[in-house]
Image (cartoon, helix red, strand yellow):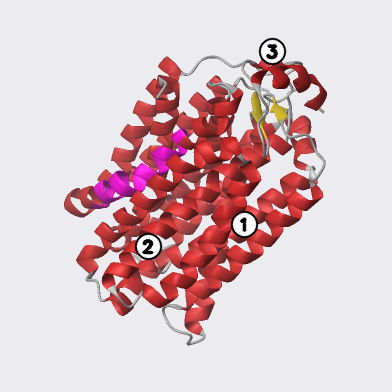
Amino acid sequence: MPLALLALAVVAFGIGTTEFATMGLLPQIADGVGVSVPHAGNLVSAYALGVVVGAPVLTGIGARVPHKRLLLLLSGLFVIGNLASALAPGFGLLFAARFLAGLPHGALFGVGAVVASRLVAPERAARAVSKMFLGLTVANIVGVPAGTILGQQLGWRWAYAGVAVIGLIALASLALFVPHQPRGRQAGIGHELRAMGNRQVAIGLATAVVGFGGFFAVYSYLVPMLTNLTGISDSSTTLVLALYGVGMTLGTLVAGPLTDRALRPTLYAGLTLLAAALVAFYFTVHSTVPALVTITFIGAVGSLITTPVQMLLMAKAKDAPTMAAASNHSAFNLANAGGAWLGGLAISAGWGWASPNLVGAALAVAGLGLAFTGGFMDRGSPGSVVIISSGAEDPKAAGPDVAQGVDVPSRSSRSAEAPRNLG
């Protein structure tokens, strides 16, 4: 793995750790700031709100800033947000600190995805982006359990301090290893917003919200499902969640090469398999071994959706891909909130702890319908499009381009056809 991609993966690792570690430390945080556990749960919402707001706002503000400098500024904000979380004396300031820590999340992933895609040859762009996402999946295996243990043993403030240290390591790695990538003279928030008006971008974001909402409808209630239906003890759920993370890592490794070969078919397959896996989990949740196998598979196929959606948005935004890529992570957080809400409604209605699986399957099917709609409307478009950093005047100004579509043509045909596909 190139060192620049490794630096981006470290950023993703830190983001994944801080996003999910809070969930495992809610009792300790509640005791520390003198609130109830449900009230402390609002800290998760504060971070998610920061992601939703920060992705488009910070990407827009930084639309004229060179990508490397923007990554460094966003990473610095990430460090400040987590240090503020570690030092917050009461719930109000902690809530504000978690919102602050969430602000750079989507923009870091969006800018990072564009940078990663331009570090390699066009036909390997999705593989590069998926390697950055590996940091997020590895965080679920290593970072989140480590942060939880650190917080339980030394105090929850040390968990956030540890994430801040990871952020500093990421900041140094970005400064050392990520090359400068210039922005073109047309770069600006208006240019990015016009690209967001593309209907394929809108359909792609809707696919992410609805389809990935199916994943979160189940993930949000996985622990109570395991303890109430599978019979797994509370002390063992962390290991099961790590198994989920293993599945996500395997799915991410597979998603990159598949997306480079055939973007839309990979997206269709991911959503179809997710729906099937969630229906299967509805029936296997009562038996330990089948449940664990199904959980691993759900993690894998869930990750199979992330990379193709990211690359689709970047492709359809054409020469202004950064805000589209960042907004994808706002969409994922809306999917998190919406999926959890709908899954909770099913449980509250008395349908049982397993019912979120059926809700999730329905959402995955709805997401598949949106993906098919986007594909149908996109028929007849060129097999590849060239993605150029926001506002670059030509491919040479932006560095290595990213060609992405359902089928990637040969290098010779791409070089001949690329100029026709910039608009």
Q: Which residue is mark 3?
A: 397
Q: Which-is-in-front pick, marks 3 and 2?
A: 2
Which stretch appears magenta? 131-148
* Horizontal side, residue 362 vs residue 373: left or right: left
Q: Residues within 10 Å of mark 1 (few under 14, many from 20)?
A: many
Give the residue at x 29% y 63%.
Answer: 27
Q: Are marks 1 and 2 in contact (CB under 8 Å)?
A: no
User: Does residue 119 appear left or right of residue 185 in this picture?
Assistant: left
Q: Disc 3 and disc 1: Cα gap in Å? A: 34 Å
Residues under labels 1 and 2: Cα distance? 21 Å
Q: Pointer 3: residues within 10 angstroms few (<14), some, or many (20+)? A: some
The answer to whether one can see residue 51 in this image is yes
Which dot, 1 or 2, sits closer to the camera? 2
Toward the viewer: 75 or 312?
312
Q: Position of residue 237 (x, y in %)?
A: 27, 64
Give the SS element for disc 1.
helix
Q: Residue furthest top?
A: 396
Indicate left or right for 353 with 421 as reference.
left
Dot 3 falls on a residue whose secondary structure is helix
Image quadrant where residue 211 sits:
bottom right
| Quadrant in which the N terminus is drawn | top left
Residue 157 appears in view: no
As drawn, 108 above or below 373:
above
Residue type, label 2:
Ile
Q: Residues within 10 Å of mark 2 (few under 14, many from 20)?
A: many
Which residue is more in the foreground, 367 or 104? 367
Q: Is residue 394 above or below residue 310?
A: above
**Residue under the image location 64 percent in, 59 percent down:** 368
Question: Which residue is labeled 2 in the image?
Answer: 295
Residue topped by disc 1: 209
